Image: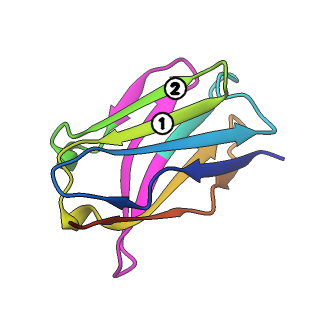
Amino acid sequence: QVQLQESGPGLVKPSQTLSLTCTVSGGSITANYHVWNWIRQFPGKRLEWLGVIGYDGNTNYNPSLASRASISRDTSKNQFSLQLISVTPDDTAVYYCAGETSAGSEYWGQGTQVTVSS
């Protein structure tokens, strides 16, 4: 059973960088055709996809983020990370990491609340 766990600070000041890490267990982030996503849910429950990193390290991002997002990985730790620069209070949300396996199964972390406030 694949499990994902988000970690990172719950409070970030405006204009700073939000950094989150997702630790994956029960499966490898380099397993063929697996993809690993970052998604957030705003206070009004709207979901927004932020970006994805594939098993091969290729990345793709939501264009609405205007290049503020960056996803990387550490294969030695079986982790992938999100950085979001120049945050504003509008970036306040619950952030989720989620994986999709080659068989089409989806796994989500429990989510972590991030609040942007001075």
Report whether 62 appears left or right of 67.
right
In the depicted view, which residue is nearer to us: 57 or 17? 17
Task: Identify the element where label 1 is drawn.
Answer: strand
Residue beneath the point at 62% across and 20% down: 75
Q: Separation of disc 2 and disc 1 at Cα?
A: 6 Å
Q: In this picture, is 54 found above or below 24?
A: above
Residues in magenta, as a range: 38-60
Q: Which residue is at 24% across, 57% downward?
A: 13
Badge 1: how crowded within 10 Å, few (<14), some, or many (20+)? Answer: many
Say if the magenta span includes residue 50. Answer: yes
Q: Is residue 17 left or right of residue 100?
A: left
Q: Earlier in the sequence, mark 2 or mark 1?
A: 2
Expressed as whole percent of the image width and height from the top left, the position of residue 6 reads 57, 51
Horizontal arrangement in the rendering, residue 15 relative to residue 91 (left or right): left
Q: Quadrant of the C terminus?
A: bottom left
Res 73 label: 2
Within the image, what quadrant is residue 111 found in? Answer: bottom right
- Residue closest to the eye, 109 or 46: 109
Residue underneath mark 1: 81
Quadrant of the image occupied by residue 17: top left
Instruction: Say what amino acid the circle numbered 1 marks.
Output: Ser
